[in-house]
Amino acid sequence: MGEQEILDVLARVLCDLLMDDSIVLKMDTRREDVPNWDSLIYINFIVAVEIELGIKFKVADVESFANVGEIVTTIKAMMR
Amino acid sequence: MASATLASKTFDGDDQVFFARLSGDFNPMHMEPLAARRTQAGTAVVHGIHAVLWSLDRLVELGAVTGGMAGLKVQFAKFIPVGSTVHLKLVRRDEKSVIAELALGGLTTTILGVTLGTPKRTDGIALPGDISKTIPTDRPAILVHLEEAMDLSGWIDFASPARQVENGFPHAAAVIGSGRVAAIALLSRLVGMICPGLHSIFAAFAIDLIETPRHHDGLWFRVSGTDERFRMVRMTVSGAGVSGSVQAFLRSPPVVQASLSDISKLVAPTEFAGSTALIIGGSRGLGALTAKVIATGGGRVVVTYAIGREEAIQLAEEIHAHIPRGVCDVIPYDARQDAAEQLKTLIADVSHLYYFATPPITRQKEGLFVSSLFDEFIQVYVKGFYDCCRFLDEHGSRALTAFYPSSVFVENNPLPMAEYSMAKMAGEILCDNMNRSAGRVHVIVGRLPRLRTDQTATVPPVESGEPLGVMLPIIRKVQSRSGS
């Protein structure tokens, strides 16, 4: 999967969780840039992405992602 | 993203009792303020499902949901403390769905998505599982461990008759039927009392409304997955005209500090003899640990509590029962109130002060800086500390050594903790000035790392240090300056 495809999956999952189709994710988007993307919903998001893509993040990675780009990069590496 | 407020409600203690009876969810997090204080919320909170059903009732009453419903999806984002006022806002409505949210002080606590339409016909869908495997209604909240959750399943009967549910949420019941309202209410009992039970946090649910050939007055549940990393439990539910999924977290139980027996292996029985330590905020957490350490070392301790009287008394009883000649007195003290008035009856001649008074440090807030929150922290961490030291200095015969627990957050400055970090830094400046003045009070400041206490037990779990290992060297350093 390319970066844009992964980005599209992340955006779709987040729009679904937050019930807001207007959310646009970019590589430099941070959690605080998206209204309501709080810690509990972040965990729900991570788990939903894992189920969607058939991957499993390390907890340390989940805690350290500074922006969406870092999630995309990690997923890309996991799917190689 | 929300539009104007449709309706507002303040959930009070009567609401808590009403919904606990209706749903069967008597989890202490909702019903017992003292126990709730030791949860991640730090205070008693509204049943999330109560807020959802109230919202649904208003959405129907006010005409935002008309015709019929095919499904309901909810994400819980933040706690709603009992006594606070939430505002229901309509975010979006089209021919297929209604999106609404509950807001508290500008923050979204709950997001609701209603799918408009009619319940699905489900002739081909299997009926709920074995209803003979019924969970008894009269047992207290279960303490489920994650490893045993995977095998859980069962049938839960309605906690209240349908007409009682109908009285509580008449508009919602008129559209989806009282049985389905009762089934949604029962989700609260499922999560709060059964799985994950006692130490749970409801995260989300999504249900389809279905037409089943048989309508049982209850709900079947089965755990469909668990995730150790995030202490998460996923379940499927069906029955009483609904079918769907539930997500919940298993939060950390209240933190138990080191026992007197553990401490006695590290502290000599006369190590702190002759000292009298006043421990402000000593009923639990680092304050209670400090009291145990000093008492184990032969020092006299006076612990204060603001809310946790029972915990403080239990601590004193534990010290008196296990330490020969141990002395632990208990007094009430609120760091936001006048120090002199509260300490005037203090008989002990205090040589050491440990100041652990703190309001809840992690708050739900809107924006980068909330001045009222900063004021609250300053009141406790700066003014409260100074006033306490001044009183002890003026009324004691001994020089006073005080410990001021600052935080590594002063250095790390985490974005959501700005007010806390700023107030602790202000406290450090005060301590420095006190040490440079000619008074008899000497203050030792320690920037504590994140330690394992009730206040730092979060979902998802964050690594925290072991309190005794960090506090013991600090206590030894503070006690080594003996008052004379």
Image (cartoon, rainbow, N blue to C red):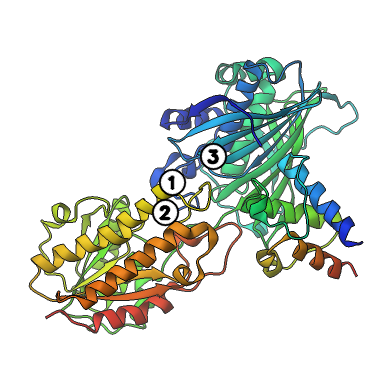
Where is B247 relative to B145, above or below? Answer: above
User: Distance between the Cα atoms at labels 1 and 2?
Assistant: 9 Å
Locate residue B320 relative to residue B361 in the image: left or right.
Answer: left
- For disc 2, the neighbor class at 10 Å (few under 14, some 14 to 19, many from 20) is some
Where is B55 relative to B317, above or below? Answer: above
Locate residue A14 relative to residue A52 in the image: left or right.
Answer: left
Percent position (x, y) of residue B110?
61, 38
Chain of the residue where label 2 is placed in the rendered structure: B
Residue shown at 50% from the left, 66% from the top: B413
Callout 2: SS = loop
Mark 3 or 1: in front is 3
Same chain? Circles 3 and 1? yes
Q: Which residue is mark 2?
A: B360
Chain of the residue where label 1 is placed in the rendered structure: B
Out of B212 and B339, give the one closest to the viewer. Answer: B339
Mark 1 or 2: in front is 2
Look at label 1 and name its amino acid: Thr
Out of B483 and B124, give the one closest to the viewer. Answer: B483
Look at label 2 and name its amino acid: Pro
Marks 1 & 2, CB-CB < 8 Å contact: yes
Callout 1: SS = loop
Q: Which of the two labelled residues, at mark 1 and mark 2, occupies the earlier sequence position?
A: 1
Q: Which residue is mark 1?
A: B43
Marks 3 & 2, CB-CB < 8 Å contact: no
Locate residue B356 relative to residue B203 in the image: left or right.
Answer: left
Where is B450 relative to B330, above or below? Answer: below
Quadrant of the image occupied by residue B358: bottom left
Look at label 3 and name its amino acid: Gly
Q: Which residue is mark 3?
A: B106
Q: Which of the two labelled residues, at mark 3 and mark 1, occupies the earlier sequence position?
A: 1
